Image (spheres, rainbow, N blue to C red):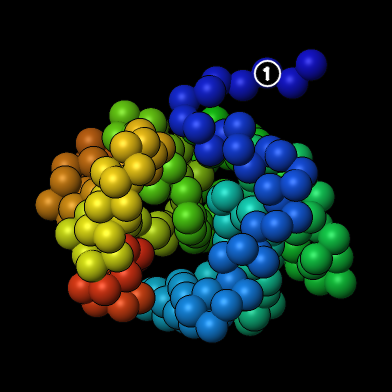
């Protein structure tokens, strides 16, 4: 039987086959969803080009392979990694035509890669599910496996959509497993994990929760 350290709820939720099959449809099929999808991919690729051209990239968690597919330009070798077997299977089926993509089933807190194996590592739509102490462990692991720079998405609690999320949660009186973080607090977490922030970029400044960080 497969065992793992359950340090945040997302480790369980995204292992469900039905959740995996509906993931892209629920998030990226509407007009707004398609816009967000395009903006996220655009920002990731823009940040990747800030430094020297990368040859090896790890995408963790790879999820359904949405970002992994966007990374397949410029003859890069891409490794999609995820703790969910169903996510890995879905992404593999989606990207089977690409010869420069492989997939690994693993936990972002303990990845089975040698140190400095990747030129760049990308982590999109993970940190909002992860509490601070676990985020620091993941950041330290991303730093360990990455030679040059790390690109990570975070969620700003003081954005318009971040405030709307908190209001909705308060009205429903539910305890949502969601962990946004301000840029100031993020600097503290980065410092503890040994990473330095080079650049931050929001997909829709002051409106969307999502903002990206390029660190090294």
**Can the viewer see residue 199 in this picture?**
no
The quadrant holding residue 17 is: top right
Location of the N terminus by quadrant is top right
Q: Position of residue 61 (x, y in %)?
A: 58, 50
The residue sitting at 85% across, 60% down in the picture is: 93
Q: Which residue is labeled 1 in the image?
A: 3
Q: Nearer the viewer, residue 87 or 193?
A: 87
Q: Position of residue 174 (x, y in %)?
A: 36, 36
The residue sitting at 80% across, 66% down in the picture is: 94
- Tell me: 123 left or right of 176: right
- Tell me: 85 left or right of 134: right
Location of the C terminus by quadrant is bottom left
The quadrant holding residue 107 is: top right
The residue sitting at 61% across, 32% down in the picture is: 12
Mark 1 crowd level (few <14, some 14–19, many ≥20, 10 Å Cα) = few
Q: Position of residue 103 (x, y in %)?
A: 74, 51
Q: Is label 1 in a helix, a strand or a loop?
A: loop
Q: How many marks?
A: 1
The residue sitting at 58% across, 61% down in the picture is: 57
């Amino acid at each position: 039987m497969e065992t793992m350290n359950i340090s945040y709820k997302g480790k369980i939720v995204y292992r469900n086959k039905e959740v995996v099959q509906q993931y892209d449809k629920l998030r990226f099929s509407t007009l707004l969803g398609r816009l967000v999808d395009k903006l996220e991919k655009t920002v990731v690729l823009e940040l990747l080009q800030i430094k020297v051209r990368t040859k090896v990239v790890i995408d963790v968690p790879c999820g359904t392979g949405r970002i992994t597919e966007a990374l397949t330009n410029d003859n890069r070798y891409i490794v999609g990694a995820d703790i969910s077997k169903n996510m890995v299977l879905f992404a593999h089926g989606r990207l089977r035509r690409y010869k420069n993509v492989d997939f690994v089933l693993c936990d972002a807190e303990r990845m089975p890669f040698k140190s400095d194996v990747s030129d760049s590592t990308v982590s999109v739509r993970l940190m909002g599910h992860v509490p601070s102490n676990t985020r620091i462990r993941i950041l330290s692991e991303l730093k360990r496996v990455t030679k040059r720079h790390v690109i990570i998405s975070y969620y700003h609690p003081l954005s318009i959509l971040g405030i709307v999320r908190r209001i909705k949660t308060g009205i429903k009186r539910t305890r949502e497993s969601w962990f946004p973080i301000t840029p100031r607090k993020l600097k503290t977490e980065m410092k503890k994990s040994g990473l330095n922030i080079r650049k931050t970029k929001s997909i829709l400044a002051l409106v969307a929760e999502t903002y990206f960080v390029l660190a090294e």
